[in-house]
Image: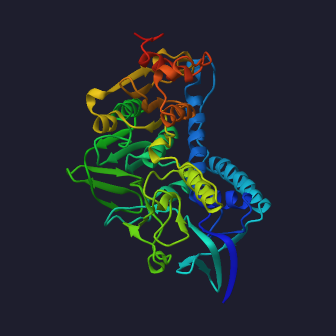
Amino acid sequence: MTDHTFDLVVLGGGSGGYAAALRAAELGKTVALIEKEKVGGTCLHRGCIPTKALLHAAEIADNARESSSFGVRATFESIDPAGVRAYREGIVAKKFKGLEGLVKARGITVVQGEGRLEPDRAVRVGDDRYVGADVVLATGSYSRSLPGLEVGGRILTSEGALELAEVPGRVIVLGGGVIGVEFASVWRSFGAEVTIVEALDHLVPVEDPSISKALERAFRRRGIAYSLGVRFASATQTPDAVTVTLEDGTALEADYLLVAVGRGPATAGLGYEEAGIALDRGFVVTDGHLRTSLEHVWAVGDIVPGPQLAHRGFAQGIFVAELIAGLSPVAVPDAHIPKVTYCKPEVASVGLSEPQAAAEHGADAIVAYEYNLAGNGKSEILGTSGIVKVVRLKDGPVLGVHLVGDRVGELITEGQLAVGWEAHPEDIAPFIHAHPTQSEALGEAFLALAGKPLHAL
């Protein structure tokens, strides 16, 4: 048994883990980064990047089909699954190569293997132990299923869906959250018949109800079917099909079933509890500075309760590295972290929804305003519909910004600044938004809430 000593040992090379490693190395710390597969984790190799590449391919397919409405004569022939895969894998490979270069340039020791935490701030990998003055746990998440629903064959998780070598004719998507609606959007653009099954009353149920309803209308227009408020009961499969039965007795048949019911924290079997780490339903319990119950052991990313977002992991990794280095970083609360769902149309939000704001401050204390993208010139040019919704405290700051429409994910940073800085609409209304841009839609909402609407009544 050999011990290797570092200032910082990071267990898990995904978004939070490699961000902590890069920032700590930049601050002069010696760092070991332990990853059982490839640095970059789920986001780079099986999540954010490859799925967004699929969504862009889907957008190109839709553009080809709809080109005549823009005065362009083009024809759509078919989807080439091998070509889409090559495009997607090329993007991932390029990003991975760049990340490898960054890690190497910072002098980080990368250990490939499955690590297990030990009580004395060490991570064991095979016959070697990597001992840190501090340890960061960043082991990410896994695709959940439901009790009695076994994944395999024609029943897929998102990882399996990425590896499909065909465009399915019919797909059932179990779960109307981010992963479910993104894959539903891709498959519909690729030509599949898609049905989403969501046990709650709306698609993307964590979003503001106005946004969820707008997405449902858009999906209905696209021919994406959905069943809301009815729970899954069972699934059976044959070599050629899968049948899903709902609790109300409805039976649905398709070529594949995608199980998209969320992601769980990857903490089991890694020695956490044995080392003294407190867990809650598998998540690592931390304080407001991401310290665990074991001194000088920290946790970041999907294993920490809260939104499971790569950019949250990046921010937490940097925050912890700076704390370890003796700096005084400011934590970003989860409520100020933007969320984007990259379906067609996109959904983006930050801060409190209208119901959340009403529950926290009282319904009479808030004002919500919706601006329809039909009044926005650039959205009209792009051919997208949707809304911008801003929630504010009466005579007070912006509490939440919520958007639905093509490309609105690119607008949410302005919303984050407004919410994070507790800006009043009157503070933002004087800022000039370039014309014609979709950002003007946010400007119109702030103008209206400031009492001086321009292109709205």
Q: Position of residue 331 (x, y in %)?
A: 53, 50
From this view, report whether residue 322 is shown above or below residue 408: below
Q: Quadrant of the N terminus?
A: bottom right
Q: Position of residue 295 (x, y in %)?
A: 52, 72
What's the residue at 55%, 78% (across, down)?
Answer: 116
Q: Position of residue 373 (x, y in %)?
A: 47, 20
Based on the displayed image, in which of its 4 quarters is residue 414 positioned?
top right
Q: Is residue 373 visible?
A: no
Q: Quadrant of the C terminus?
A: top left
Viewer-proximal residue, 192 or 247?
247
What's the residue at 31%, 67% (across, down)?
Answer: 148
Can you name the residue that lies furthest to the right here?
A: 105
Q: Seen in the image, is 226 located left or right of residue 321?
A: left
From this view, report whether residue 296 is shown above or below residue 332: below
Viewer-proximal residue, 101 or 321?
321
From this view, report whether residue 392 is shown above or below residue 340: above
Based on the displayed image, in which of its 4 quarters is residue 449 positioned?
top left
